[in-house]
Image (cartoon, rainbow, N blue to C red):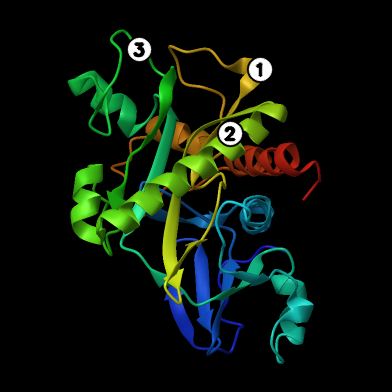
């Protein structure tokens, strides 16, 4: 079942993103992941089969796997355990939804980079640094960094997030909270990176969002999904070029071949591109969990 919008849910909307719709249930929230896809901050008309189920199910897997490092906001992923009135949506919500606690979110995205790619590669080529940290000379695209680097950014309501230094994060949140975010982010990255390697995957980089419940730090939103992380095929890994990835990078690369200015309206996605993108998401899920979506 493909889900483009969730207007069938007769509850107050708490927030709506490019992919997720969140509903206010009073003392909790219901997060529903659609099959929408965006690239370059533009949402496409076409849907990607199973994308919502992959993203939600992978997050649920990682929230459980990492709960020894830091608590999270998950209450349940089973629609049968949701509040009264949701039974009628069970088929639509199965595998793509999550009942969560309300969290006072912190105004930062916490990014950890273990390999040289994306904006980190661009920064390195300009200044020899990643996140303001000086790196060895001679690194090439996709090289493994000497140590994972914590590179926070602001969380902007509109437009792109802005990369900031750790010192700037301290100014925004205070030294204690900033240190907690850095330590939790690095510990999460290391644990999941080690696990991913046992599945033939390299976790190149990832991002987290944190908040507080009753003053206690928790990780929230999503975790280690193909939308928030770069997963590469370890068997195909070769520094000096772009890597085979399990995310929407395939879609981005195809879009770069078009005469499109990366603004709305989005171009039409051919069936071949939709199917290949869906296969990337499904393979990431099966590699990580050992299950089929």
What percent of the width, then of the height, locates residue 2?
67, 62
Horizontal side, residue 274 vs residue 114: left or right: right
Check the image and name the residue furthest to the top.
Answer: 138
Please state which of residues 168 and 157 is positioned toward the viewer in this rendering: 168
Give the crowd class for mark 3: few <14, some 14-19, many >=20 residues within 10 Å.
some
Give the crowd class for mark 1: few <14, some 14-19, many >=20 residues within 10 Å.
few
Q: Quadrant of residue 3?
A: bottom right
Of labels 2 and 3, earlier in sequence is: 3
Of labels 1 and 2, earlier in sequence is: 2
Which residue occupies 75% across, 80% down? 81
What percent of the width, then of the height, locates residue 96?
66, 64
Q: Quadrant of residue 34?
A: bottom right
What percent of the width, then of the height, locates residue 227?
51, 47
- Residue 158 against residue 30 in the figure, above or below: above
Residue topped by disc 2: 193
1 and 2 marks in contact (CB < 8 Å): no
Of labels 3 and 1, earlier in sequence is: 3
Residue topped by disc 3: 139
Cα gap from disc 3 to disc 1, whole angstroms: 21 Å
């Amino acid at each position: 079942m493909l889900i483009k919008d969730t207007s069938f849910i007769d509850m107050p909307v708490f927030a709506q993103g490019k992919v997720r719709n969140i509903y206010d249930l009073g003392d909790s929230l219901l997060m529903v992941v659609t099959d929408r896809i965006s690239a370059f901050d533009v949402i496409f008309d076409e849907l990607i089969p199973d994308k919502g189920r992959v993203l939600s199910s992978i997050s649920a897997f990682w929230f459980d796997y990492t709960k020894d490092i830091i608590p999270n906001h998950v209450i349940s992923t089973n629609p049968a355990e949701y509040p009264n009135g949701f039974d009628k949506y069970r088929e639509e919500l199965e595998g793509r939804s999550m009942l969560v606690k309300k969290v006072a979110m912190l105004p930062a995205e916490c990014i950890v980079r273990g390999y040289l790619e994306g904006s980190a590669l661009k920064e390195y080529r300009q200044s020899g640094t990643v996140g303001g940290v000086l790196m060895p000379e001679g690194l090439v695209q996709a090289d493994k960094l000497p140590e994972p680097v914590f590179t926070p950014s602001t969380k902007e309501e509109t437009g792109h997030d802005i990369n900031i230094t750790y010192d700037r994060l301290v100014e925004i949140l205070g030294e204690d909270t900033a240190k907690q975010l850095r330590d939790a982010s690095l510990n999460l990255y290391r644990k999941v990176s080690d696990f991913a390697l046992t599945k033939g995957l390299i976790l190149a980089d990832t991002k987290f969002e944190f908040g507080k419940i009753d003053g206690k730090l928790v990780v929230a939103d999503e975790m280690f999904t193909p939308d928030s992380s770069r997963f590469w095929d370890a068997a195909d890994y070769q520094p000096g070029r772009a890597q085979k990835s399990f995310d929407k990078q395939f879609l981005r690369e195809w879009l770069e071949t078009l005469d499109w200015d990366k603004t709305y309206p989005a171009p039409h996605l051919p069936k071949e591109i939709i199917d290949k993108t869906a296969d990337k998401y499904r393979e990431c899920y099966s590699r990580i969990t050992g299950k089929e979506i």
